[in-house]
């Protein structure tokens, strides 16, 4: 078991060393490169979520769900029509299509495909909109800060939970969905996110100290929810990882679940309120 963990940790580190510089570069580029990256991630996440849903339901054909994902993401970037109007049209289309399908339960089929489309596309759409926010680099700084805080929270929670888990607080954080998550890991992740946000003060002059700290506190406080939500779906379907696309990390859903959950909250907080 210990050898497996060390190999897994090595894989995670190597992927991070290669992936993080590339991701930061694309975030700084913004525009079409950032959109294309999010589109690829959204398609991969949709495919993974579709495979999970197939254990419980018989959603609409994969080609249709992937095509609708492309359509939604294109609309987030080019804003052809209001998002709610597009989603309204998609919902009505799926209802009509389900009339002609005979496999599975219509309630489960429609519920699964709508969960896939809404969860994946609204979360990545919020991240895209966050990057496009402001005229003085605020969007770029907010997206970078979001990733930095999530990474800091993940690393701090991992090592804090490994070293202190169960020694100070015997009760698990959320044992029903994630038996290995501990309160020590949670508080370590919270502290790591807050600390990382403060360190970014000199690196991100576009953001105020209040924006930096608020993001750090927010990410540290709610980031476990993203992982728990994905765990809820995977446990219901009886699968361990969403895929094996990213060595040592699992799939796109496994790696970006926290980003997907936190991005809409940060977007609403800074861009809409």
Image (cartoon, rainbow, N blue to C red):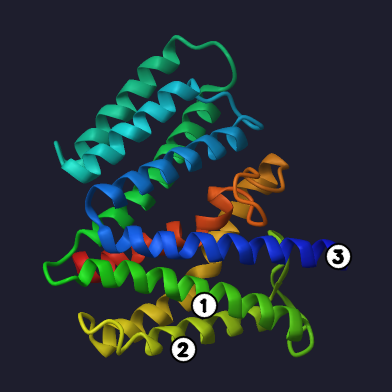
User: Residue drawn at (54%, 11%), measured in percent from left and top?
Assistant: 102
Rendered position, 169 above or below 179: below
**Label 3: which secondary element:** helix
**Mark 2, residue position:** 195
256 or 93, which lies in front? 256
Could you tell me residue 164's position as x and y percent?
A: 74, 86
User: Residue drawn at (50%, 69%), measured in percent from left and top?
Assistant: 223
68 or 41, which lies in front? 41
Earlier residue among tags 3 and 2: 3
Contact (Cβ within 8 Å) of mark 3 with mark 2: no
- Tell me if 179 is positioned left or right of 158 in this view: right
Rendered position, 58 above or below 223: above
Quarter occupied by residue 206? bottom left
Contact (Cβ within 8 Å) of mark 1 with mark 3: no
Contact (Cβ within 8 Å) of mark 1 with mark 2: yes
Q: CA distance from mark 3 to mark 2?
A: 31 Å
**Label 1: which secondary element:** helix
Rendered position, 182 above or below 267: below
Q: CA distance from mark 1 to mark 2?
A: 8 Å
Could you tell me residue 57's position as x and y percent?
A: 60, 28
Could you tell me residue 117's position as x and y percent?
A: 41, 38
Earlier residue among tags 1 and 2: 1
**Mark 1, residue position:** 152
Furthest-left residue in this view: 135
**Mark 3, residue position:** 3
User: Residue drawn at (58%, 53%), measured in percent from left and top?
Assistant: 254
Could you tell me residue 52's position as x and y percent?
A: 61, 37
Total residue callouts: 3
- Tell me if 170 is positioned left or right of 60 in this view: right
Q: Pick the quarter of the image with the N terminus.
A: bottom right
**Label 2: which secondary element:** helix
């Amino acid at each position: 078991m210990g050898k497996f963990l060390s190999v897994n940790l090595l894989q995670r580190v190597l992927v991070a060393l290669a992936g993080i510089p590339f991701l930061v570069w694309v975030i700084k580029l913004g525009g079409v490169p950032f959109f294309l990256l999010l589109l690829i991630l959204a398609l991969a996440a949709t495919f993974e979520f579709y495979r999970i849903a197939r254990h419980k339901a018989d959603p609409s054909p994969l080609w249709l769900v992937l095509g609708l994902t492309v359509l939604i993401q294109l609309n987030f970037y080019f804003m052809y029509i209001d998002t709610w109007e597009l989603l309204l049209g998609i919902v009505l289309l799926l209802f009509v299509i389900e009339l002609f399908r005979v496999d599975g339960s219509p309630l489960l089929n429609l519920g699964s495909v709508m969960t896939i489309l809404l969860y994946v596309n609204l979360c990545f759409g919020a991240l895209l909109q966050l990057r496009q926010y402001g005229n003085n680099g605020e969007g770029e700084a907010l997206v970078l800060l979001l990733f930095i805080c999530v990474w800091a929270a993940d690393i701090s929670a991992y090592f804090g939970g490994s070293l202190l888990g169960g020694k100070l607080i015997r009760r698990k954080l959320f044992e029903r969905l994630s038996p290995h998550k501990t309160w020590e890991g949670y508080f370590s992740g919270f502290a790591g996110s807050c600390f990382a946000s403060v360190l970014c003060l000199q690196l991100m002059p576009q953001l105020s100290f209040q924006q930096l700290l608020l993001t750090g506190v927010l990410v540290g406080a709610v980031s476990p929810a993203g992982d728990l939500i994905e765990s809820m779906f995977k446990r219901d379907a009886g699968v361990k990882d969403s895929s094996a696309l990213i060595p040592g990390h699992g799939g796109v859903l496994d790696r970006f679940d926290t980003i997907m959950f936190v991005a809409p909250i940060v977007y609403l907080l800074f861009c809409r309120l």
